[in-house]
Image (cartoon, rainbow, N blue to C red):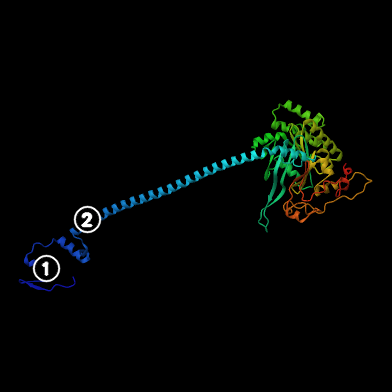
Amino acid sequence: MSEAPPLKDREGRLSACWHSDRLAAGRTDRPAPQAAEAAFQAEWSGEARYAPSVETAAAAGTAVAAVETAAGTGAAAVKAAVENAVETAVERVMGKAMETAIEIAVGTAVETTVETAVGTAVETAVEAASAPALPAARDAIASADDGEPDAFADMPDSPEDALIELRSVSKHYPFGRSLFSFAAKAVQAVDDVSFTIRKGETFGLVGESGSGKSTLGRVLLQLEKPTSGSVLFEGRELGALSPSRLREERKHMQMIFQDPYGSVDPRWKVGDIIGEPLAVHGRLSAAEKRETVLELLELVGLSASAYDRFPHEFSGGQRQRIGIARAIALRPKFLLADEAVSALDVSVQAQIVNLLQDLRQRLNLTTMFIGHGLNIVRYVSDRIGVMYLGKLVEIAPSEQLFRRPAHHYTRALIASIPVPVPQRHRELAVLQGEIPSPANPPSGCRFRTRCPAATARCASEQPELRPIDQGHFVACHDPLDRGLPIEIGRRPVSADWRI
């Protein structure tokens, strides 16, 4: 295609063709027109140079088959090698793990056996060595007893006849973080309080407003859940009971509220108010319920005509009697009187206090009496606890607490009682300063900011409640003198100050 053929003479014929010689020779082996055209196209496109021959294709197929066979054999070999390696590795790891587990198990068993054997031998040796000395020790202790009471015989956390026991009870109320502080804060209404209430006694609780008395009472009855600690009633922890079991236990624990106006429903009649506990916990018919309510009205000093009347028709003292009748309707074992007389007149207070004392004797009640009036608490209580800023600072028998207070705060409370004798003039002892915020109590002793005897130790170390006499416990690093008579003690409290 690159050069035009010249015109040649071929046996008298002029022909311009490169193949005129072959045509003239009469060859018959030329390709067919279709084959010639295909060869021409292949030569023109360049494919002819790459077109494999039959032998080349056969050789290529053989090579491909050989390669595939070799690849398959290699893959099988690789797979087998990998499986063998994995099995070997797993066997090694499992073997090592089994060896380690066996070693640990054997070691633990050996250690346990040795410890048991050694412990048994030591205990046996100690018992054998101390057995002859125990009688002599007991005799020595008995001979050394000089008649003084054992201060540890009546710890407030483990009496045998306890009806209610509080163990490290705390109640904190968290509040929101401020704009300038991201630290969580809480009002420490009650903090780490422990004491017991014995069966049949009246335990008084006193302290300034905001000291945590009412909150502690509500936690005791599980009206408020404690933040920490536990409350035990007859040995059963109330916080661990289911709602249904706790409801059953509440039949034995009732409360007289402070406000005689707000503690009753003004739309209910007195018979319905007093009979509500019977309807909730009892299975009485209507006639039996009415008869029981009438008996309760008579027991608290109200007439039977009060059954069909409304609360607004009664005075404050009478409403409080209605609240007392409702509280004793189920014959509970424990009664909490939360400042039950503080909202009443003095003459009515005496009537309610005498009524509570009478009911205690007739129904064999155990009572916790919370109040501000120290003389009333002294009159009704067998033992008294003093609270300050969420802490219990002193516990003692009633008369002993008033005659020989050991805590400086207790002394200040007693010294603030007015003397009902006009001829005697004395200056009342008044605590300086205000009670600190329970959201940010002082470090160490919480009373140190107002205590006249505070030292550096009071700021750094919190005093623990400890015994100082039979049934007398105080949380103070420097308690008041205990061995001096009332007349010559440090700022004594005279016995005739009481009402």
Q: Nearer the viewer, mark 2 or mark 1?
A: 2
Label 2 belongs to which residue?
62
Q: Which x, y percent locates residue 191? A: 71, 47
Give the amino acid type for the residue marked by disc 2 in the picture: Thr
Q: Is residue 459 left or right of residue 92?
A: right
Question: From the viewer's perspective, is 305 left or right of 1?
Answer: right
Label 1 crowd bin: few (<14), some (14–19), many (20+), radius 10 Å: few
Which corner quadrant of the image does residue 361 belong to? top right
Q: Which mark is residue 19?
A: 1
Position of residue 473 in the picture relative to residue 5 (left or right) = right
Apparent side of residue 101 relative to residue 331 in the rendered image (left or right) = left
Task: Examine the rendering and report whether any part of residue 121 can be seen.
Answer: yes
* Residue 60 picture quarter: bottom left
Rendered position, 136 above or below 407: above
Q: Quadrant of the C terminus?
A: top right
Viewer-side residue, 296 vs 151:
151
Could you tell me the amino acid type at mark 1?
Answer: His
Q: Position of residue 484 (x, y in %)?
A: 85, 46
Residue 124 x, y percent position in the rendering: 61, 39
Sooner in the amino-acid sequence: mark 2 or mark 1: 1
Residue 367 sits in quarter? top right
Number of marks present in the image shown: 2
Q: Residue furthest right?
A: 423
Q: Is 425 in front, or is 115? A: 115
72 lies above or below 22: above
Alpha-carbon span between mark 2 and mark 1? 40 Å
Q: Residues within 10 Å of mark 2 (few under 14, many from 20)?
A: few
Q: Secondary structure at mark 1?
A: loop
* Residue 470: image tag: none
